[in-house]
């Protein structure tokens, strides 16, 4: 039996405000606790202070891209899973190379697909512990 979803904490890094709001609402509605920031540099202090089960990050952001953020996340919080969202196919390929364990979800996507992928990340994590 899996852990209740509401114990899962997600850190969302997305520079586009409308998308950030949209994703936060969908994930919260699915039962996740979500902290959201508008850039990678704003995510770092949160990763240092709190434990997150998942870093969900846009790849292309100002100041610090999602790949660099994921690399720092791996150092700060190695148990935090990483999932990328992007609208750029070439960037998606780089993410797969630099972070082979991370799932990449390409825009546009339906919110249902996002929630299913997040659920899958946690289901895989739970099964790995059995």
Image: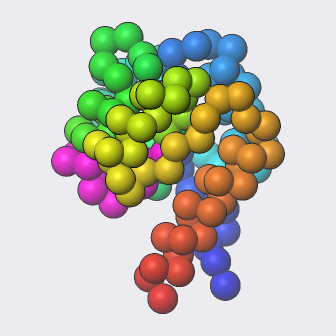
Determine whether, in the image, residue 128 is placed left or right of residue 111.
left
Specify whether residue 11 is in view: no
Q: Which residue is drawn at 52% across and 24% down?
A: 88
Q: Which residue is drawn at 44% across and 20% down?
A: 60
Q: Eyeballing the image, is 76 above or below 58?
A: below
The spot of residue 112 in percent (x, y) is 80, 45
The spot of residue 120 in percent (x, y) is 63, 63
Examine the image and state in which quarter residue 21 appears.
top right
Q: Eyeballing the image, is 54 above or below 106?
A: below
Q: Eyeballing the image, is 20 above or below 100?
A: above
Q: Which residue is drawn at 38% across and 11% down?
A: 62
Q: Which residue is drawn at 49% across and 70% down?
A: 125
The spot of residue 106 in percent (x, y) is 61, 35
Determine whether, in the image, residue 74 is placed left or right of residue 28.
left
Residue range (magenta): 74-83
Q: Eyeballing the image, is 12 above or below 65?
A: below
Please say whether residue 104 is one of the residues in the magenta stretch.
no
23 or 3: which is nearer to us? 23
Examine the image and state in which quarter residue 64 appears.
top left
């Amino acid at each position: 039996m899996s852990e209740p979803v509401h114990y899962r904490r997600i850190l969302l890094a997305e520079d586009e405000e409308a998308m950030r709001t949209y994703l936060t609402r969908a994930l919260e509605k699915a039962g996740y606790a979500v902290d959201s920031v508008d850039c990678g540099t704003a995510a770092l202090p949160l990763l240092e202070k709190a434990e997150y089960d998942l870093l969900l990050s846009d790849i292309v952001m100002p100041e610090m891209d999602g790949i660099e953020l994921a690399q720092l996340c791996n150092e700060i919080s190695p148990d935090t899973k990483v999932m990328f969202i992007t609208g750029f196919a070439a960037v998606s390929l780089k993410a797969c190379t630099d972070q082979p364990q991370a799932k990449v979800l390409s825009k546009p996507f339906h919110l249902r697909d996002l929630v299913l992928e997040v659920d899958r990340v946690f289901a895989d994590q739970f099964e790995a512990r059995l």
